[in-house]
Amino acid sequence: MDGRALDELRPIEAKAGIIKNADGSAYFRIGKTVAYAAVYGPRELHPKFLQDPKTGILRCYYNMMPFSGIGDRVRPGGSRRSKEISMVIQKALKPVLELEDYPNATVDVFIELPQTDAGSRCAAICAAAIALADAGISMKDMVSAIAVGKVDDKIVADLNYDEEAYEDGPVADIPVAVLHNTKEITLLQMDGEISKDELLQALELAKKASDKIAKIQFAALKDKYKVNADQR
Amino acid sequence: MGLLVKQKDIVVPGEVLADSIDYLPGMHTYRLNNNIIAKRVGLVEIEGRALKLIPVSGRYLPKVGDKIIAKVVDITMSGWMLNINSAYNAMLNSKDIMRFVRKGEDLTRYHDVGDYLKVKIFNVTSQNLVDVTMKEPGLSPLHGGRIVMINPQKVPRVIGKMGSMVMMIKDKTKCLVNVGQNGVVWIKGPAPEAEFVAIKAIKKIEDEAHLEGLTDRMTQFLDVECAHLQGLKSETQEEEPRETFQSFQRSQEREE
């Protein structure tokens, strides 16, 4: 709809280590959707009843800033929607993390979105994955997320808001998180209508797209140490 | 095919380091089918057929035998609770300090909340409960001075081979420098200016720890930075009691 090819992603930009106070942090932009992630921990977990003596836990907080939407003010604070997204992000990231080394501790991931144009949970996951790696937490794999779907009768990648809100035909919006090496899917949600064949096609597209994103995530992390080298 | 990275390359989690059976996964890497995959952001170290990573980021994980600098955060019935710049606190039992503590005595007489102590970890349980001791030469409370936090993964570079780097900073800035394995560095100098130079040097090492030729660059850096300290030093150095300085250095050398 905005002049991209069907499988073309919006321009992506990623940076690691932008929040100095945090143990790890990242910035991830895809088109007009911007996500900042900050990771704190592993650190002591309070309240104590949440502690798990077998493993550390991961807590995610997803938040859209009040001015981040299309024009309507997003009411600050947690909502039913942000709580759900926080949970799916946590479940998308947890499988790759090795938190067994940190019993009774927690790793907190805070994700803020100053600007959104659909695909915010995917941008959030991408940013959080970079930030977790930057924080030096053991990860079996890189997590890359992208929304795919169907607009009218075409399978497309990386829907923006106009595509997602298309009214003259069937629309399906499917956020997917894919592990880089195994191509396992850790997040799969759907809104809209799509046939089984088309869904499988869309997932193939998501896997291809996730490769591109993973490359950008890798480059962002490596860049952090290159920048340091240039400063001397 | 085979090896996909070079020695000292920066790699990131999920990156494939080698794609053949001929290589073995070492620290912070694992095997998936034929591939060796990295689990941390770090520098590749190739040792024969084994590939291991030296992490460049991450928090401190307590290890038995480490000498660390800890801050007293609480006082319990039997000892002190210490913050060790990690996800876990450490316990220092009143039996594990150099002096005899009578039963029921007020523990703040020895170490109060907010004090910094150099301690050694002698036990870590599976649940990461950490026990530390001060019953060893070189382990003592650190009075005065200032604290700098650095990335615990960079501590070996700050210390240098056989303590060469930290000795150089001590020599040139005339500061006392005590580096804990947990990334807490204690600095006390003859004048604030000298301390600032030492802090700057340590921060520089931290930033450039993964780059080669660090020692030469640091020598140069310290020569330049210390040039303007010259006049100042001669005036203020006398304030530092010689004897304690030397005995301190001796204990440091033993440690390193």
Image (cartoon, coloured by chain):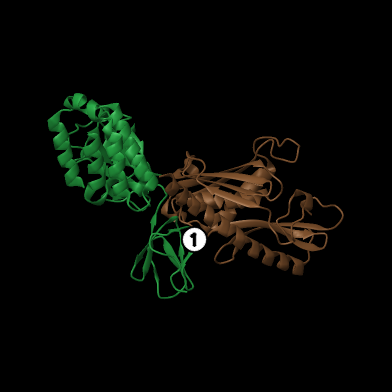
Chain colours: A brown, B green
In the figure, A232 relative to B229: above or below?
A: below
Q: Amino acid at mark 1?
A: Lys
Report x, y in % for residue B218.
30, 44
Which chain is mark 1 on? A
> A188 or A67: nearer the eye?
A67
Q: Is residue B8 visible?
A: yes
Report x, y in % for residue A111.
59, 44
Instruction: Indicate left or right for A137 with B206 as reference.
Output: right
Instruction: Indicate left or right for B94 with A3 as reference.
Output: left
Q: Which residue ends up furthest to the left in the rendered image?
A: B243
Asked where in the image residue A171 lies, by quadrant, the reply is bottom right
Report x, y in % for residue A157.
71, 59
Report x, y in % for residue B109.
24, 26
In the figure, B11 relative to B165: above or below?
A: below
Element under disc 1? loop
All told, the count of numbered labels is: 1
Q: Is residue B110 visible?
A: no
Sort mark 1 into few (<14), some (14-19) or many (20+) by Cα contacts within 10 Å.
Answer: many
In the figure, B118 relative to A139: above or below?
A: above
Look at 52% across and 60% down and name the residue there: A141
Look at 25% across and 43% down and name the residue there: B166
Look at 60% across and 62% down and name the residue there: A211
Look at 69% across and 46% down and name the residue there: A32
Asked where in the image residue B54 lies, by quadrant, the reply is bottom left
Residue with the mark numbered 1: A140
Instruction: Indicate left or right for A77 with B240 as reference.
Output: right
> B102 or A112: nearer the eye?
A112
Q: Which residue ends up furthest to the bottom in the rendered image?
A: B21
Q: Which residue ends up furthest to the right in the rendered image?
A: A168
